[in-house]
Amino acid sequence: MWSSKNSVHVFGSPTSSRPTTCQLFRPPLQQQYVVITILAMPPRLNIVVPIKRVIDFAIKPRINQTKNVIETNGVKFSLNPFCEIAVEEAVRLRESSKDLVESITLVSAGSAKIQDTLRAGLALGADKATLIDIPAIDDSRSLELEPLAVAKLLKAFVEKSNANLVIMGKQAIDDDSNQTGQMLAGLLNWSQATNASKVTVDEASGVVTVAREIDGGTETLSAPLPLVITTDLRLNTPRYTKLQDIMKAKKKKTEKITPEDLGVDITPRLEIVSLSEPAKRTGGGKVDSVDALIGKLKGAGAI
């Protein structure tokens, strides 16, 4: 608390540095009461951004010799593109107003190899990062987490970190599940806005407005905090990281925890029996006339 000439400033929450302002009205001497008007400030955003390490989008995945898992030895990995967009949006919210965002925390589940992915996210502008260490199956890979297990880990982490906003990619490009964000919102019992193409925050009311593309147009949703947002490709274009930002990221705080620390059972519920390559497409052909085309289509049973 501190005071000025005509007002007293009181910190309304131990987790927020934004004060509540009490305006004091000085009464005449003959009156024996004071009228106090309390102007409550909206909460600052404590943002959690879950990210994932995936095979680089420019690499074609290959099935290993056992035909039940994707080959990862000698393969380039990078930050999931949708997750990168989520980190960029969190940083842009901070840049839009210096008093809007209190912290941006990255979290990812996997092996120690994910440290490089977390550093990439920190270089984009996040404040700190947490690795949820997943036990390894062998030297090349960790236990594969299912969307529900990831959602349970994130729920426990979000509650532990007192976050009021989660921004995450709508899907990972390796499994394309598009389930974790929705499951997380359900477990937390929070509002959700999926496939966001635009995000704005009203600082006065603390209401978040999200535009999302749908068939035939754009749908606009508004919801108070806390909220889960999943990002679409059209939300933004992530910035290129500078060398100085990469060097600064190495000094930012990172911690390691385990699923046991969060009290979450990550035992798989599903078993992948086999994987197979899609059938190769046959080459096309040319015809000399419309009649020839119709004849071929009839022969193929297409018409």
Image (cartoon, grey):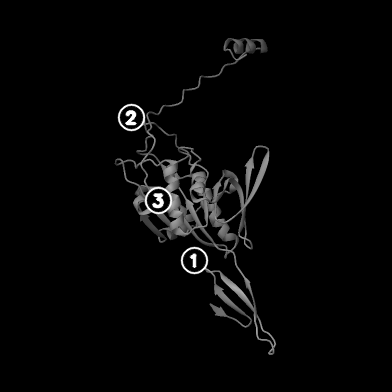
Camera-nearest residue between 110 and 269 = 269
Q: Helix, strand or loop at disc 3?
A: helix
Identified by mark 1, the residue type is: Thr
Which mark lies nearer to you, 3 or 2? 2
Identified by mark 2, the residue type is: Thr
* Left or right placement of residue 76 versus residue 6 in this view: left
Please tell me whether residue 50 is drawn above or below residue 71 in the rendered image. below
Mark 3 = which residue?
A: 116
The answer to whether residue 202 is seen in the rendering is yes
Please tell me whether residue 81 is drawn above or below residue 161 in the rendered image. above
Please tell me whether residue 286 is drawn above or below residue 114 in the rendered image. above
The answer to whether residue 55 is seen in the rendering is no
Query: Quick one: label 3, few (<14), some, or many (20+) residues within 10 Å?
Result: some
Which mark lies nearer to you, 1 or 2? 1
| Residue 52 percent coordinates (x, y) | 44, 46
Q: Helix, strand or loop at disc 1?
A: loop
Mark 1 = which residue?
A: 15
Count of marks overlaid on the render:
3
Q: Earlier in the sequence, mark 3 or mark 1?
A: 1
Q: Earlier in the sequence, mark 3 or mark 2?
A: 2
Report how far apart the C-alphas of labels 1 and 2 lie in the structure.
51 Å
Mark 2 = which residue?
A: 66
What residue is shown at x 60% (from left), y 73% (from top)? 21
In the picture, residue 303 is in which quadrant?
top right
Report how far apart the C-alphas of labels 3 and 2 lie in the structure.
28 Å
* Left or right placement of residue 109 versus residue 179 in this view: left
Camera-nearest residue between 152 and 84 = 152
Which mark lies nearer to you, 3 or 1? 1
